[in-house]
Amino acid sequence: MSKNYDANPFNERSPGNSDSAGALLRLRDTSNGPHFIYDGEASYVLKHENFVFSSTKTFECGQCFRFDRAEQGLYKGVLAGRFVSVDGYDGYAEVKVLEGPCGDSFASYLDYFFDVATDYRRLSYELSLKDDVMKDAVNASCGIRLLNQDFFETVISFILSANNNIPRIKKCIENLCRNYGKKIANGIFAFPEAEALSKCSGSEISELCKVGYRGPYIAETSKLFASGDMDYCNILKLSTNEKYKNILSLPGVGPKVLNCIMLFTGLDRSAFPVDVWVERMMNELYGLDITDRVKLEKYGRDYFGENAGLAQQYLFYYIRQIHGK
């Protein structure tokens, strides 16, 4: 049976880890440059001429599944146990809390989530010098920011992404949240905690949430998080190779899912996930003839270097625009 819970006033703990989101912020320096400022009510605003941002491109590039386009170009979704709206363009971003608690600590969380300490203007310029294809991709995609997403939520979301399209992935995640997440408002649910999912059988998750063969993967992976065997802060202490090895050991995690997790949680910004769109793009635009996606992943990482993850997002967004997706 489904197991909804009323949301607490607010619990900043990550669904899959014992440390709060605030604790994770201390691992990154956001002391200089742009910041989100809390207005004392429900809005958080960032204004800075060097802040490169497009809410549309950031939320439509395949890295995040809980935000949808709403009225007047806003994006609405669930973030850190709150129902929020996001609006933004170069030099400006505004996040409004529609349901859930507010406070100064959430401004710091937004700095972390939107990776405000990173100079995307500089990175975009450097990538545009790589070749003509990337120059065109930067022109089409600049404004994408790589989000620092919750570790557990990202793991489960990309396990669900395997052999799935984006609308279907979003539907599966919504089913999971409705059945096992804490209620934030009428019809709005937080991402489930690992403990809640760990108590369910894979067959139950598959049946209730319509996730097919992925149900047992979700159940078994959640048990590893709930027990503390898989923990974000412990992962951070490992070498890059050890991080990849540990996360690859999770049920339902293969090479593409692994690279998505590494990239979209900020564990490795040189990760280069390859799916059907990226495979098509690399072969079509770069004149390659490589069908082995592991080899394409290595090619992308070697060619684009430490910014391969951002290059991948630019190219992913660009190729989908070319093909009208």
Image (cartoon, rainbow, N blue to C red):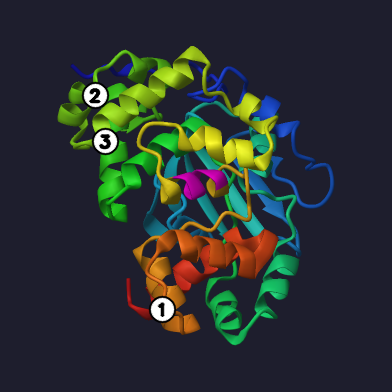
Q: Are marks 1 and 3 in contact (CB under 8 Å)?
A: no
Q: Is residue 185 visible?
A: yes
Q: Nearer the viewer, mark 1 or mark 2?
A: 1
Name the residue tied to disc 3. 214
Q: At 34% from the left edge and 78% from the top edge, which residue is drawn?
A: 323
Above or below 198: residue 306: below
Residue 202: assigned label: 2
Specify whether residue 261 is painted magenta. yes
User: Counting residues from the N terminus, which is met first, the one under dot 1 or under dot 3?
Assistant: 3
Q: Amino acid at mark 3?
A: Arg
Residue 202 pos. (x, y %): 24, 24
Instruction: Give left or right: position of 134 versus 255.
Output: right
Distance between mark 1 and mark 3 Cα atoms? 32 Å
Residue 90 visible in rendering? no
Q: Upstream in the sequence, badge 1 or badge 2?
A: 2
Q: CA distance from mark 2 to mark 3?
A: 8 Å
The residue wearing badge 1 is 289
Q: Is the magenta region chiefly helix, strand or loop?
A: helix
Nearer to us in this view, 21 or 215: 215
Tag 3 secondary structure: helix
Crowd class of label 1 (few under 14; some 14 to 19; many from 20; radius 10 Å):
few
Locate the C terminus by quadrant.
Answer: bottom left
Q: In what quadrant of the picture does the N terminus appear?
A: top left
**Badge 3: residue crowd in 10 Å (few <14, some 14–19, many ≥20):** many
Of the numbered discs 2 and 3, the one sitting upstream in the chain is 2
| Magenta segment | 258-262
